[in-house]
Image (tube, rainbow, N blue to C red):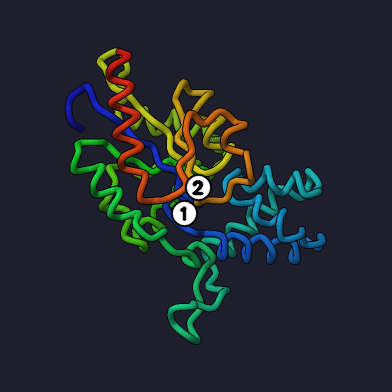
Amino acid sequence: MSKSPRRLVLLDLDGTLTASHPGIIASVVQTFKDLGYPVPNDSELRRFIGPAVKVSLRRNGVREEDLDRGVQIYRRYYSEMASFEDPEHHGQHIPGRLLATVFDGIPEQLNRMHERGLTLAVATCKPEYQALPVCDHFGLRPLVDGVYGASKDSTRVTKDQVITYALEQLGFDAEHGDRALMVGDRWTDADGAQETGLDCLGCGWGYAEPGELESHGCYRVIDQVDQLFQAAEDYFDKDQTQH
């Protein structure tokens, strides 16, 4: 790790770096079918993208006694079982985590931020054991300085817990001048940032509902991927003048 002061950018994964809805939704649908619950409607299914899956299962009427089994079923479809046809390779099947694409322009934006000396890390509520192979598969791992996610044992699941963990792993030291910014597309990113004393840059190309990011306190919302590098630069330039 470079010496302080550093400028850290924590990046959400689903809806910020990757369009991951096909695999998440397909895995959720199979989970409800296996549990014997009615499958939620399309708008509710999209709300599974971002929050911890247990939170979303509970919101959609899954009983407390079925929640842990629901999480296990979801993880099996999403991470382990090659259950879904690969759109890139006809006749082959892949787990849900690989049924996604990187948003156009993201690699270029990450490279530009790195070239300007920013420290980049993925901070996701997706379990870390799922996030790492996703980042490897889509070529994101070499573009960031770390990938941090929820724990498999559910002791670290919320975005504020993940942010705290990521900052600890990165050796973040505010007293020595380190600054950090959360970048994400859902209310969970904004709330998690606030709870850990960070600002959140909202990504309008993700899965937020209209007005969601603003109402949860994002200091700014950008609508296009190609605005990401400049928005981060602007934030830290402004931030520097205030410290």
Above or below, 56 relative to 220: below
Lateral position of residue 57 relative to residue 155, left or right: right
Q: Secondary structure at mark 1?
A: helix
Task: Report the Cα–Cα distance between label 1 and label 2.
Answer: 5 Å
- Pick the front one: 39 or 153: 39
In the rendered image, residue 237, in percent from the top left (x then y), is placed at 28, 26
**Circle 1 residues within 10 Å: few <14, some 14–19, many ≥20:** some
In the rendered image, residue 156, in percent from the top left (x then y), is placed at 53, 35
Above or below, 82 relative to 140: below
Q: Secondary structure at mark 2?
A: strand
- The residue shown at (26%, 42%) is 113
- State the mark number for residue 130: 1
Residue type (three-letter) at the residue carrying disc 2: Pro
Lateral position of residue 168 relative to residue 84, left or right: left
Quarter in which the C terminus is drawn: top left
Q: Seen from this angle, which residue lies furthest bottom?
A: 91
Read off the residue under disc 2. Answer: 127
- The residue shown at (62%, 39%) is 211
Residue type (three-letter) at the residue carrying disc 1: Gln
In the rendered image, residue 75, in percent from the top left (x then y), is placed at 58, 57
User: Are dots 1 and 2 in contact, CB under 8 Å?
Assistant: yes
In the rendered image, residue 207, in percent from the top left (x then y), is placed at 57, 50
Q: Quadrant of residue 103?
A: bottom left
- The residue shown at (47%, 54%) is 130
- Pick the front one: 79 or 216: 216
Above or below, 92 relative to 230: below
Q: Quadrant of residue 146?
A: top left
